[in-house]
Amino acid sequence: MENISLNKSLLVALQFFAFSVQAYWSGGVALGAHLQALNVAAVFTAVQVASLLAFGLLADRVAPKQLLVISAGLFSIGAVALFGGTLPWIVAGQALSGAAAGSMVVIFAAANRHTADDDRSYAMRRLVGFVWFGIGFGQIVGHAVLERFGLTGFAATSLVGAMVIVVVVAKLPDLPRPPRMIPESIRARFSPAFGLTLVISFLAAASGSVLQTRVPFLFEENSSVLTFLICVAAGGGVWVSRRRRFQQRNESGILSASLAVIGIGFLVPTSTDNPWAIGSAFFLIGMMIAIGDACFQSIIGIVSRPSSTAMSIGILLTVATGGKLVATLLAKSPSSFAAAAFISFIAAFLAILLYTRVETHIRPNN
């Protein structure tokens, strides 16, 4: 399938779907924190990991809108389950929502397939920007609704969010099915550059997620507000980046630079206790993480075959989730920021190696 020029209506619809999904997910995280029940967030994450691979496999074979209709239905049923009020119903609702959240693979794969090379970098930055807006919005609204209206109010808000997702999916234009997959070996389907991208993604997620896990410990009652502001700044920084011609070697170069800046940012809390300095460093780290996320999605469009784009994105996001789980272990260590800085610098070095691989990499035609 040949890429087409950037479809603005498609991109706008995908942006709002990404925003809605991430807001819904972030609200679920706030719910787990409010109930002080780790299994709520853990169930969501565990089911989402499995659904990322499932949606990745299906998105290489089924038209995107069909999969997003299924996702919207799962979100709606999950929201209704929250009205049960008891922990089993809440866990069931979050499990259904986690399954639906795997459809983010479909979003990125659709944008990757249906935009021309010249527009792909721009499209990915816009999508990632809305993802970060959604995380910040869900975090702040979830906490506010739970504190003021309790679980019933949160369930009603979740149902409204699910209805928004349904409307957005209904507005999506019909897209053709992905190209028919040609039977081939795993080695032929995934290049060495793709494997290196996965390693970097794991390390980047492990270091970057330390920011999310440590903010509540450092800023306590102001943590939700600070997280919201960081997400908005990060999303805004990557969303307003100027549209420019997609260049293969630039993406891995930008990724390396952003990871190096993240490493430097994590060194700030190790050298000062000034909350303003630490807060400024966190804002910078958030923006660099968002830029890195967009670079990863663009790089996948280079190092994977068109017939395996969605599966490649699903694997990438699953590996990144594994890195986030490592971050929860790092957060318990008093030297977590130093460890995150060290991991970031390693990832930046590997991104330089990826720069040399991507520079000469030619994306296959089938």
Image (cartoon, rainbow, N blue to C red):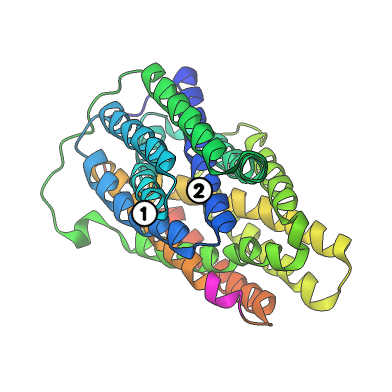
**Horizontal placement of 273 versus 101: left or right?**
right
Number of residues whose C-alpha sits closer than 10 Å to that of mark 2, classed few (under 14), some (14–19) or many (20 or more): many
- Above or below, 6 against 343 in this view is above
Residue at position x 53%, y 33% in the image: 157
Which mark is in front, 2 or 1?
Answer: 1
- Above or below, 44 against 122 in this view is below
**Which image quadrant is residue 346 in?**
bottom right
**Horizontal placement of 57 versus 321: left or right?**
left
Residue at position x 68%, y 50% in the image: 287
Residue with the mark numbered 1: 88
Q: Nearer the viewer, residue 180 or 253?
A: 180
Q: Residue furthest bottom?
A: 334
**Residue 329 percent across, percent down from the top left:** 53, 76
Amino acid at the residue labelled 1:
Pro
User: On residue 28, which mark appears?
Assistant: 2
Mark 2, secondary structure of its residue: helix
Amino acid at the residue labelled 2:
Gly
Q: Nearer the viewer, residue 302 or 53?
A: 53
Cα–Cα gap, marks 2 and 1: 15 Å
Quarter of the image containing the N terminus? top left
**Which image quadrant is residue 263 in?**
bottom right
Q: Which residues are magenta?
A: 328-332
**Residue 220 percent across, percent down from the top left:** 74, 62
**Residue 271 percent across, percent down from the top left:** 83, 77
